[in-house]
């Protein structure tokens, strides 16, 4: 798994930064002489922010600062990074202490996102800015392509804009259930248009669950049905 991650991000397998990026602080606490990934995470956050900002400026030359900032936030967030990590089974490559491994800490959204940032720093240190840019494109490329094609990467904003265009109040989100361990909780959320539930979703954070619920409302068209029903009811 370690080598597969290295190949995906273009990091030389023999690079010492690769192992450091995959080393969680809990592992360092149990192994003297090892270095964890926290400093790389700090650097990787900046590398990712710069590379994505550069990509957005190239893809959207007419966008103003506010639009670019919103687009960057949709690409660079813990849920998005953890989604890429889960698709590549990154949790099985992270070095954890015994207690952290027993509690499956490596499957948590924040740990996965932090490790992705550390890996991007490893790509930068091993190969320079061009290598870092290629690694960042690997991580955000699918979302960026959807964004460039005009496909919404933020279903909450899309749902709210559609409702506003119809003169309807913003949607309301409600947590229906939650569970899971403290380091990796899950949330089950519904979204309402007025009193009508138009979508439901689950996620590893309230934000991601709300996004899933909004996406469900858009995919099913239930939001539109609720608006039409409400308009029929208020007709004289």
Image (cartoon, rainbow, N blue to C red):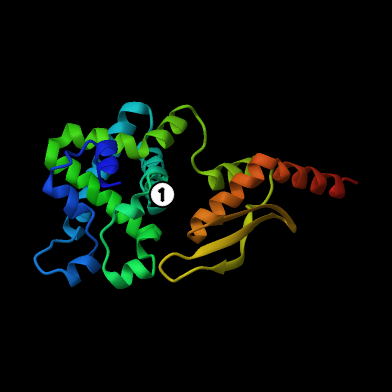
Extreme-left residue of the structure: 33
Residue 37's place in the image compared with 216, above or below, is: below
Q: Which of 217 and 139 lies nearest the eye of the viewer? A: 139
Q: Residue at x 56, y 68 (%)?
A: 178
Q: Residue at x 26, y 68 (%)?
A: 97
Q: Residue at x 11, y 69 (%)?
A: 32
The image position of residue 185, as x and y in percent, is 48, 65
User: How many C-alpha atoms fall within 10 Å of the one at disc 1: few (<14), some, or many (≥20)?
Assistant: some
Occupied quadrant, residue 15: top left
Relative horizontal placement of residue 119, taking residue 108 as reference (left or right): left
Q: Secondary structure at mark 1?
A: helix
The image position of residue 176, as x and y in percent, is 63, 65
The residue to which callout 1 is attached is 86
The image position of residue 141, as x and y in percent, is 37, 34
The image position of residue 25, as x and y in percent, is 22, 66
Q: Which of 13 and 205 lies nearest the eye of the viewer? A: 13
Res 61 seen here: no
Residue 68's place in the image compared with 148, above or below, is: below
């Amino acid at each position: 798994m370690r080598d597969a991650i290295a190949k995906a991000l273009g990091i030389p397998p023999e690079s010492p930064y690769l192992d450091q990026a995959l080393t969680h602080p809990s592992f360092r606490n149990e192994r003297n002489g090892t270095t964890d990934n926290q400093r790389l995470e700090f650097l990787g956050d900046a590398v990712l922010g710069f590379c994505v900002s550069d990509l957005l400026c190239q893809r959207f030359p007419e966008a103003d600062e506010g639009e670019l900032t919103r687009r960057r936030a949709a690409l660079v967030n813990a849920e998005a990074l953890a989604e890429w990590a889960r698709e590549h089974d990154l949790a099985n490559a992270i070095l954890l202490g015994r207690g952290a491994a027993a509690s499956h800490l490596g499957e948590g959204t924040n740990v996965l996102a932090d490790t992705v940032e550390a890996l991007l720093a490893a790509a930068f240190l091993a190969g320079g800015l061009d290598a870092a840019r290629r690694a960042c494109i690997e991580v955000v490329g699918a979302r960026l392509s959807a964004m460039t094609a005009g496909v919404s990467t933020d279903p909450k904003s899309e749902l709210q804009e559609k409702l506003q265009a119809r003169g309807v109040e913003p949607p309301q989100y409600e947590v229906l259930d939650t569970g899971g361990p403290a380091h990796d909780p899950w949330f089950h959320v519904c979204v309402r248009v007025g009193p009508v539930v138009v979508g439901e979703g689950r996620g590893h954070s309230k934000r991601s669950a709300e996004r899933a619920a909004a996406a469900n409302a858009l995919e099913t068209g239930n939001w539109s049905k609720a608006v039409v029903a409400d308009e029929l009811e208020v007709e004289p």
